[in-house]
Image: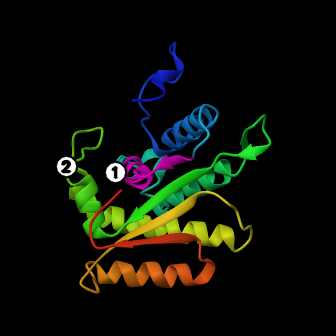
Amino acid sequence: KGLYFLGGQFNAEPAQHLTTFVDFVKEFISYASNRSSGAVGLPNLIPYMFYFWHKDVQSDYLGIATSGNAEKYARQNFQRFIYAVNQPYVRDGSQSAFTNTSIFDRPYFEALFGGSEFPDGSFMIDEIEGIMEFQKVFLETMAKIRSKNMMTFPVNSISLLRVNGKFMDEEFARYACKHNMEWNDSNLFIDDSVTS
């Protein structure tokens, strides 16, 4: 819906592209973190970034698709987000906003977002395979940044469902554990039921 809660007409319209969405998220983090003492949790950030990225790729926004730069465009916007949340936002510009992001295996995603809709009315669950791959691009981008600069934020959690000693999405669990071996840049939340 945009940043309608700021009052007036400033950014009161919904984002149309990934770049604008990332800018709105950055502004929201600044707004929220300056009005609370807790973390700004963004559990649905990656699915919504996927929505705007996919929309931009389908419409060939700025020639992204025809130039073969779709993944590069995603990585650049992940970088924009990660670098931004490590800038001093709060306490008179002396601290970064405590920001959380989340990654989900298929059962978690299905349970949490199975009935959720994107702004165009399409169901998130219909894009699960694309979102699963998009989450990997986010994790890989975060790891690449941390190979050069061990940034604090976002604090990322990967949620994995494990029932009777077996991961329900074993392929993604293996990927997540292998990813985390390099920088230990994500918390692994493992439970036998889907919880928040």
**Colouring style:** rainbow
Q: Residues within 10 Å of mark 2 (few under 14, many from 20)?
A: few
Q: Residue at x 66, y 48 (%)?
A: 84
Q: Position of residue 121 (x, y in %)?
A: 22, 40
Horizontal relation, residue 8 to residue 193: left or right: right
Type of secondary structure dominating the magenta stretch:
helix
Ranked by sequence position, the earlier of labels 1 and 2 is 1
Q: For residue 125, which quarter of the picture?
A: bottom left
Secondary structure found at label 1: helix
Q: Position of residue 77 (x, y in %)?
A: 55, 53
Q: Which residues are magenta?
A: 39-53
Find out whether the residues at labels 1 and 2 contact each other: C-beta distance under 8 Å: no
Mark 1 or 2, closer to the camera: 2
Q: Residue at x 45, y 70 (%)?
A: 136
Residue farthest toward the top in the current orientation of the protein: 8
Q: Residue at x 80, y 42 (%)?
A: 94
Image quadrant for the C terminus?
bottom left
Secondary structure found at label 2: loop
Residue with the mark numbered 2: 115
Identify whether 91 is placed above or below 51: above
Horizontal relation, residue 88 to residue 126: left or right: right
Q: Nearer the viewer, residue 68 or 186?
A: 186
Residue with the mark numbered 1: 58
Q: For residue 13, which quarter of the picture?
A: top left
Spatial CA span between label 1 and label 2: 23 Å
